[in-house]
Image: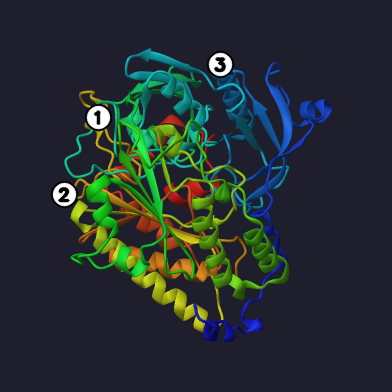
Amino acid sequence: MTDRSLSNHQPGDTTWTRRGLLRAAAALAAGPCLIAADPAAAAAELPGFPADVTLSRTAYRNWDGEITAVGLWACAPDGPVQAVAVVNWAWRNGWTVRARGAAHGWSPLTVAEGTPSEARVLLVDTAPHFDGLALESADEVRAGTGVTLEALLTFLEGHGLGVTASPAPGDLTLGGALAVGAHGTAVPARGERRLPGHTYGSLSNLVLSLTAVVWDPDSGAYALRTFTRDEADCAALLTHLGRSLVTEVTLRVGPDTRLRCVSRTDIPAGELFAAPGSDVRTLESFLESDGRAEAIWFAFTEFPWLKVWSVQPAKPLTSRRVTSPYNYPFSDNVPTPVADLAGRMVSGAAWYLAPVLGNAQLDAAALGLVATLSADIWGPSKNTLLYVRPTTLRVHANGYAVLTRRDGVQRVVAEFTAFYRERLEAYAAAGRFPVNGAVEIRVTGLDDPADTGRAGARAPSLSALRPDADRPEWDTAVWLDVLTLPGTPHAEAFYRELEAFLLTTYDGTHARTRVEWSKGWGYTGTSAWSDEDVLETAVPSSFGPVWTEAADSLERLDPHRVFRAPLHARLFG
């Protein structure tokens, strides 16, 4: 972005509302808020509630603060039996139940924005007590759904086990990650063979069995039931979008690997995201050589932060050994120049400073990698896979997975980044700056049920990484996210254009777009999760007939819709 572009800024074009200001401020300071429960009020408002289950009043806030609710009732069952009692109480008294883990998500799959305190919505906190971990065999682990990913991976590491890839934040609960089909970034490098117990797909594809609270027609009440991977109902529950309460899972895991992660900021976006066939350092070239890569491209900059992981049993000479995760403190703790700029943009509606903020974030990354000796690190997989703390800058993120052939990855990346760059420059020329964060690009394999090693295993029905039955040659997904401070003017309109491009360009002809459940999608010009055509047509059709099958399973397992949120009603009817 040039000085000339900044001079085109027109203050009248960056209008903002008080609500937008508050949402943006949430990105700079966000945290939970608990309110002590009044026993008398609890008895009056929740008559007959199980006496041995702890109740509290709570404020719910999602990751970026765009979804908040104050004064909701919450409880913390001490185990599955109490959870069943809570669900049956909710069913008999006309309440809905929403499982809450870390609330590290964007979409209203748990609580809808504007939910009043008097709403009959009961949050069930899984983190306090659903945190058990036990090794069932050499390659199976039983885990409560309230356990965090960091705790799970630490436990596995202690037994010489690990996963191929995982989401970067370690504070996610396992139940929350499975509910949305959470993923990392990994495809097999040239000549690489998948290790037993590993998958290049989502975490949901590691599940061998799960236990959930579901309707039992024989007893006429909700009860615990364990499902195995070869059951159709299990396939629906593997990525249930918050439409159930899963209490425990058994995962297949494999031997841990030592990973080297090399970061660099010296490859221009025009080269990294070049059209396929270019004889340069493209993203595809790194996937071929190492299999695991992520590009973080800050707005209005030219040099992305590229991270490349490779399997390295022995420590390379130039690598720094890391014995714990979160090795990018300059990213986890917002640097003062970045925080000052973001604060100025929020408090003074100085959104035209987006190019300055983008370059400040790139400078912080480039200098931080050197200052912290983290440009080349090596260690057990957990220590390089987990790298996002809750203290990082909290931004709104849209999210999509584009299913394609492995040799089509660079085409998708090149087409998307070219469209993004053109639209961002067009907006800036008009004095509008809808993006002040980054584009994040990851690449994974799909959910191959054969990875479980279990005969008859089914793919997760609603995972964005579910293979397309009509296009078996598609074996890879390109994940695309665009980040910006919540409340940024014109962001929704910009996101709507990006979404329309993805849905029309990758419509099933040579690739297909699916939404990333935990992120933003379904944009109108003013809000996410609101476009009727996307919610009611584009999303279901991207899954084909399995959408209806999964919807029927989830409805049968919860016929009284105890676990149903408003967004579920719009998606499933």
Label 3, residues with CA under 10 Å away: few <14, some 14-19, many ≥20: few
Residue sticking out furthest to the front = 317
Q: Label 2, on which residue?
A: 473
Q: Amino acid at mark 1?
A: Leu
Which residue is drawn at the image coordinates 32% and 36% (left, top)?
460
Q: Label 1, on which residue?
A: 195
Near-viewer residue (249 or 203): 203
- Residue 464 visible in rendering: yes
Q: Label 3, on which residue?
A: 81
Q: Residue 89 appears at what percent x and percent y?
A: 62, 25
Q: Amino acid at mark 2?
A: Glu
Near-viewer residue (554 or 177): 177
Label 1, label 2: how many angstroms apart (C-alpha)? 22 Å
Q: Is residue 27 left or right of residue 180?
A: right
Looking at the image, residue 21 lies above or below residue 204: below
Mark 3 vs mark 2: give the one in front: 2
Label 2, residues with CA under 10 Å away: few <14, some 14-19, many ≥20: few
